[in-house]
């Protein structure tokens, strides 16, 4: 295992007691393979009548990937999709040339714990038609008191159902009883690990809450020890060949694509249609930093 690069998470308070901790992108590390965004949401217990309510907002050039750990979240989008996601499930929305969605915790849902990720689309697919898919189950196996859930990609005999467009992997590793899992890594992939809860050790290195650990590339094995109840996300992927530009909710391969998306969102272009009956509040885009 190469020398670990420890990256402090950035905390943001979204109100109603909801803390979001951002692991990607940061100044130290923009991407892990095609994974270009990672927020650790919660865990939070909402006060009565409170919850997460994200108004209508657009995306281009990416896939949004939601992994639910605790609680429920209702997804609606401009394709007509409406899906409640529960623990152990994945929502995958492919923005492509453009899509709009909202996210809300249902009434009476008192607890929320999730990971929100983005996957950058390769240049040749950046303008592909938008789509939405829900996966009620992911492949799971137990090893040495640790449960491995394969969220994306392939691992040994396991094949995750999520349809992605770059070579990558995503795992949740959870200490069901507490123990050590020995994993085989792809040497051509770079990897990063995000502790979600509890105590854990990567080889001889103790991992701390509040940090994202970049493992680099060229590694062929990983040994992770988790206490009972501890969990972590492990992301891997082939280093992305094309650098991407990220601004607000858009991912593009040049500034012109993002500038056009902002113009289209502000002016009600057809590619950014309404969500449901259109009554959800629309989020406003901040000014372009290069305008």
Image (cartoon, grey):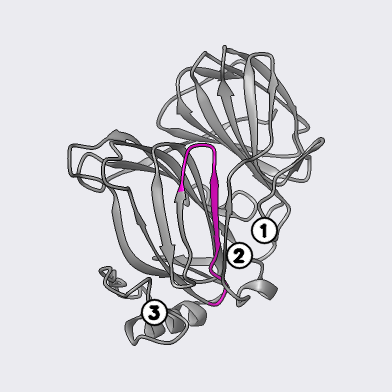
Q: Check disc 1 and report the residue beneath it.
A: 240
Q: Quadrant of the N terminus?
A: top right
**Label 2, label 1: how far apart the Cα atoms are:** 7 Å
Q: Nearer the viewer, residue 40 or 135?
A: 135
Judge whether residue 27 can be spotted in this image: no
Identify the magenta region.
85-97
Q: Give me the residue at 71% from left, 47% from top.
A: 153
Residue 170 position, x and y percent, is 63, 42
Nearer-N-terminus badge (2/3)? 2
Residues tagged 2 and 1 counted as in contact (Cβ below 8 A): yes
Q: Nearer the viewer, mark 2 or mark 3?
A: 3
Q: Residue 243 — which label?
A: 2
Q: Quadrant of residue 178?
A: top right
The secondary structure type at the circle numbered 3 is helix
Residue 139 position, x and y percent, is 69, 37
* Looking at the image, residue 187 lies above or below residue 196: below
Residue 268 position, x and y percent, is 36, 85
Query: Magenta stretch containing residue 182, yes or no?
Result: no
Query: Magenta stretch containing residue 87, yes or no?
Result: yes
The secondary structure type at the circle numbered 1 is loop
Q: Check disc 3 and report the residue beneath it.
A: 262
Residues tagged 1 and 3 counted as in contact (Cβ below 8 A): no
Q: Quadrant of residue 175?
A: top right
* Looking at the image, residue 19 lies above or below residue 146: below
């Amino acid at each position: 295992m190469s020398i670990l690069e420890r990256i402090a998470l950035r905390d943001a308070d979204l109100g109603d007691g909801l803390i979001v901790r951002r692991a990607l992108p940061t100044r130290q590390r923009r991407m892990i393979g095609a994974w270009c965004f990672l927020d650790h949401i919660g865990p939070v217990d909402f006060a009565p009548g409170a919850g997460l309510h994200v108004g209508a907002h657009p995306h281009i050039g990416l896939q949004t990937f939601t992994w639910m750990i605790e609680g429920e979240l209702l997804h609606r989008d401009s394709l007509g999709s409406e899906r409640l996601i529960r623990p152990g499930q994945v929502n995958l929305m492919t923005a492509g040339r453009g899509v709009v969605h909202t996210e809300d915790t249902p009434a009476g849902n008192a607890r929320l714990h999730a990971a929100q990720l983005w996957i950058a689309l390769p240049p040749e697919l950046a303008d592909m038609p938008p789509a939405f898919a829900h996966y009620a189950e992911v492949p799971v196996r137990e090893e040495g008191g640790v449960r491995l859930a394969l969220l994306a990609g392939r691992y040994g005999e396991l094949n995750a159902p999520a349809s992605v467009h770059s070579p990558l992997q995503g795992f949740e590793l959870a200490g069901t009883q507490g123990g050590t899992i020995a994993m085989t890594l792809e040497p051509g992939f770079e990897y990063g690990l995000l502790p979600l809860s509890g105590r854990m050790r990567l080889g001889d290195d103790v991992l701390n809450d509040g940090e994202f650990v970049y493992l680099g590339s060229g590694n062929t094995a990983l040994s992770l020890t988790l206490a009972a109840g501890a969990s972590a996300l492990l992301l891997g992927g082939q280093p992305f060949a094309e650098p991407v530009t990220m601004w607000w909710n858009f991912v593009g391969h040049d500034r012109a694509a993002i500038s056009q998306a902002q113009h289209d969102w502000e002016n009600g272009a057809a590619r950014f249609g309404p969500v449901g009956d259109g009554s959800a509040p629309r989020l406003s885009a901040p000014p372009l930093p290069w305008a």
